[in-house]
Amino acid sequence: MGQTLFDKIWDAHVVSSNEGFPDILYIDTHFIHEVTSPQAFDGLRARGLPVFRPQQTVATADHNVPTWDQHLPIKEELSRYQVDMLTKNCAEFGIELYGLGHPFQGIVHVIGPELGITRPGGTYVCGDSHTSTHGAFGAIAFGIGTSQVEQVMATQCLLQSRPKRMKIEVNGNLQKGVGAKDIILYIISQISAAGGTGYAVEYAGDTIRALSMEGRMTICNMSIEMGARCGLIAPDETTINYVKGREFAPKGEEWDKAVAYWQTLYSDEDAEFDSVLSFKAEDIEPMITYGTNPGMGIGVTQHVPETASFEQKEQGSYKKALDYMGLHDDQQLLGKPIDYVFIGSCTNSRIEDLREVAQFVKGKHKADNVTVWVVPGSKQVQEQAIREGLDKIFDAAGFPLREPGCSACLGMNEDKIPAGKYCVSTSNRNFEGRQGPNSRTFLASPLTAAASAITGVVTDIREFLSEEVV
Amino acid sequence: MSTKIFKHIQTSVVPLPIENIDTDQIIPARFLKATTREGFGNNLFRDWRFDNDGNPKQDFVLNEPKYSGKILVAGKNFGCGSSREHAAWAIADYGFDAVVSSFFADIFKGNALNNGLLPVQVSDDFLKRIFEVVDADPHAEVEIDLVDQFIKIVKTGEQESFEVNPYKKACMTNGYDDIDYILSKKELILQFETP
Ligand code: SF4
């Protein structure tokens, strides 16, 4: 019987497999950031252990960093302390750090791929749930807790049971104005925020194949929002072309060898999945979430569900979510005034996202009632955007281009959405307080976010597209 | 290094019948700045537990004097979202030894097990029964036995068995540690690395 892509990569990384024990899985690269690593370094010190493979460990500072005036010291004391701690720990344990001011600094899931560190067939972990992003290259990549960060630091291995395998196919042509973010928000809305729990999800089908690497990363990034262990997409020409020539990508003969191997990485025709789901691209509208988990999403023209449509035992949680969001049964979000628009996060802060938004807002201006933040995913994205003149377009539109970091994705740094305010956000989580205490998040694609910034209300991007060609 | 040992407990419980409780609720991001593992319990469920001025919200379970105990019982898909282990630390630091739900998010489950906090997955019906019994009698006790893998509502005698990875069970009941185990196979790691 054939093998799935996931199993091929997993098997190639098993160091030891014993009945009754989880497998010991070898990790090619361990990404770390300032929030989930300090306790792991302390653990190593307590054990008197070094980092086993410092050269296979890559560090950056992203969660706590300000996205304005980054050259100044971080104002918030605890944030500054955490970032300083990472600097000290990396120096002590011999780990390369792409910290503030470094040309490679950025959100950990943006820099791995753009530096050519993330490659097909590899295994990647990070103390961060959106590590699933890296799976877009046809790799196994998932988030781990801090005890496991310590484990990988100490051994370059992770104790892990093999998850079940799920295939999600999307076939057909997307409507105009519908992109990768809408696809994944749609899938999660269909299978719920827990629908993928326990699975490694392979995305397949011609709609997925037609996506750019950036789009594929957006999809894999949000795999965790349906509870999946990881998401992955078989590598192809698009993948290979993306990796080629990047800073740390293999070169010369090494490159040819690597490509030959990558071409063997696909699920065999007769590979068996524990679950297979299919969706039609034509069914997907521009999506928006109305609730407090990413599964609570609807097409932008649809209405918020009625409480009565849920099972009795779910109604309490549902009502709580609507109350928090200040919404009611059967409400339409279209036309609802908003206060903030956040374009950024490891889901949608790559150069392609910024290009798409810039192209759309060129010659337009944001509505007066809206504050807009455009936050590049990395220093390299920021510089590329400036080279292409996107910053000028953004400025003219009232969309200032900020500096790289997680920013308003998580309310941990200076960029927070104030209590009670509505933000159309291209990030990945709409949990209560995620963007700041009592903030209210509508998750959407970069185009939907940009269109809503222009009109000042939740907007169907397709209304713009009927007038012009984007 | 050894970790906390867990074999058996019997205590009253704290009911939190909300579904999809994500780790941002368990411990909001702005409290993740500490660089040690201690003290997170003070901010457990921070924004549900305290108002903006830091005053306890009287209607939240942790602030209701009638509820206490070492077992947290919550709605399905508990611990979804961020991989922050701080969530498990906060729950354990607050004083819980076990969390009962009808479904756990993967990463949370692993994090809990790595910190001597036992996640006990029960059926929807059993979960409902616990909520009902505790609603009628806030002091009703629940017994959890990891060795024999069962959970029991003491008052009614209703009982269910639960699953736990045998390796993780051995770790928790003996205080074994993953890193010691992997390092015992160091030869194999070095072999794997040799082309
Ligand atoms: S951008 Fe948001 S989701 Fe991504 S790594 Fe940063 S905080 Fe996490």
Image (cartoon, coloured by chain):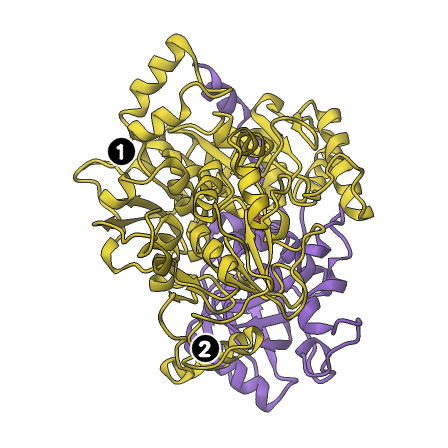
Chain colours: A yellow, B purple
Label 1, label 2: how many angstroms apart (C-alpha)?
42 Å
**For residue A307, which quarter of the picture?**
bottom left
Position of A369 compared to A191: left or right?
Answer: right
Position of A219 compared to A276: left or right?
Answer: right
Q: Residue at x 66, y 53 (%)?
A: B86
Camera-nearest residue between A298 and A391: A391
Task: Report if residue A278 is visible in the image.
Answer: no
- Say which of marks 1 and 2 sits in front: 1
Which residue position holds label 2? Answer: B126
| Residue B172 pos. (x, y %) | 59, 52
Count of numbered marks = 2
**Most extreme residue toward the top, as rendered?**
A253
| Residue A321 pos. (x, y %) | 52, 74
Which residue position holds label 1? Answer: A266
| Residue B47 pos. (x, y %) | 68, 69
Tell me the amino acid under the disc marked 1.
Tyr
Q: Residue at x 70, y 30 (%)?
A: A101
Is the residue A203 above or below the residue B48 in the image?
above
Position of B154 compared to B30: left or right?
Answer: left
Q: Residue at x 46, y 46 (%)?
A: A357
Is the residue A88 above or below the residue B48 in the image?
above
Q: Residue at x 79, y 48 (%)?
A: A78
Camera-nearest residue between B123 and A233: A233
Q: Quadrant of the N terminus of chain A?
A: top left
Task: Report if residue A138 is visible in the image.
Answer: yes
Does mark 1 have its CB less than 8 Å from ligand 1?
Answer: no
**Most extreme residue toward the front, as rendered?**
A363
Tell me the amino acid under the disc marked 2.
Phe
